[in-house]
Image: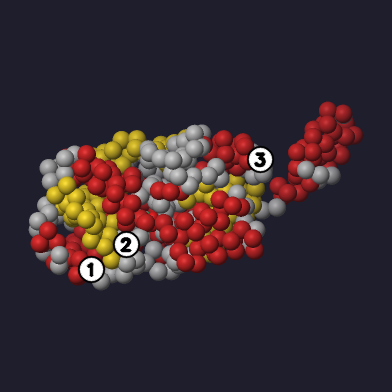
Amino acid sequence: MSVDNRWALSRRGVIKGGAALAAATTVPTGWAIAQAKPLKVGLMLPYSGTFAKLGENITFAIELLIAEKGGKLGGREIQIVKLDDESKPENAPQNADRLVKRDGVDVIIGTVHSGVQMGIHKVVSESGTLTIVPNAGSVAVTRNLCVKNVFRTSFTNWQPAYGMGLAAAKKGYKKAVWVTWDYGAGAESGAGFKEGFEKGGGEVLPSLVLPFPQTNFQPLLAQIPGLGVDVVGSFFAGGGAVQFVKEYAAAGLKAPLCGSGFLTEGTLEAQGAAADGIETGLHYGDGLDNPKNNAFRKAFKDKAGRDADVYAVQGYDSAQLLAVGLEAVQGKIEDEANLYKAMRGAKIDSPRGSISISPSQEVVQNIYLRKVEGGLNKVIGIAAENLADPGTGCKLT
Ligand code: PHB
């Protein structure tokens, strides 16, 4: 019997009167039994390696939102299944396949690394598993390879870097170079920075790169003085960002460092004075004074024992978006049409400010300009207001 037929049976029962009503309410229907089963949510995230802390913060925040909702979303108990993807793209398709086929998850929330995301994307584009991306910015996921079952609550690699490029040009810098890891996120953020910087009249030299997740920065830093640039833009994150910022400061270079906000996000304690004055573009920052952010930061600190950062916000919003969808279909995840409709139309009260979902199922959001001061990424302006990724090549509209 199909799920829809079961619905019809119990609905007919209600209409037919008392006895049928009693039967419909006391004998669990197939649908009711299905609803009583916990909904399995697979967290495919890095819990080891240079992005381990990012994965942990995303996880804490997802668990926080679920706990705030009493352990249930849309009436369904949530069961979490965790998988450490180690930020290794070569293992990603196999890992995602394991979650879908062996663990039988209903939803995947993952991941952080753009290359790993592409592996997940291949699997879930075929299986149709609902997937929410809580960080990885790989543009193809919500551009030419977009699919109706994949949503993103974070950013595209283009968004923060494009905002930073605009802001750097506005400050009067004319010549820049982008320094980064040689993988999707590094290249796509470099392209975003170049687009923004050139729009403001600047010139960007070919990027300086090293393989992910290496941290042998000295050969790159040694090239910078000879390039004659007046600003250096950069994408690094997690443990790699901590080390890069420290070595950049120690090198005593004249050109100021800027970048996608991940460069100084969740890393300031470890970077110390080396990060002072660095300006970055990101969809979150310290000192955003709205009630949701204030409540979230307190609850996160109570749970995690450390301050929230953008990764925590993205994890929280992934769970918020899932809640919107499941509440609209009362936990009946098979009701794809209504589930996706609700998620596409979601207006989410995020700690970053209110956000909506673009036609390519990506976040429309402000890119803030931040400056490191006193151990904080202080918001000093808006680099790009309500910025949507162009979603080029996505036909979901
Ligand atoms: C990515 O690989 O897309 C990525 C990783 C870490 C970040 C941001 C983007 O902080």
User: Mark 1, mark 3: which one is toward the viewer?
Assistant: 1
Q: Secondary structure at mark 3?
A: loop
**Between disc 1 and disc 3, whose residue precedes?**
1
Q: Nearer the viewer, residue 268 or 121?
A: 121
Numbered disc 2: secondary structure? loop
Please name the residue that numbered disc 2 is placed on. 182
Q: Is residue 366 left or right of residue 27?
A: left
Image-quadrant location for residue 162: top left
Is residue 313 at all visible to an observer of this figure?
A: no
Q: CA separation, marks 2 and 1? A: 13 Å
Q: Tell me the kind of residue under disc 1.
A: Phe
Q: Is residue 290 left or right of residue 171?
A: right
Instruction: Judge whether 2 appears above or below 97 on screen.
Output: above
Residue 318 percent across, percent down from the top left: 49, 48
**Sequence-first disc among 2 and 3:** 2
Q: Is residue 99 above or below residue 330?
A: below
Q: Which residue is mark 1?
A: 217
Mark carried by residue 247: none
The residue lying at 12 percent from left, 42 percent from top is 172
Residue 77 drawn at (x, y percent) = 64, 51
The amino acid marked with disc number 3 is Asp
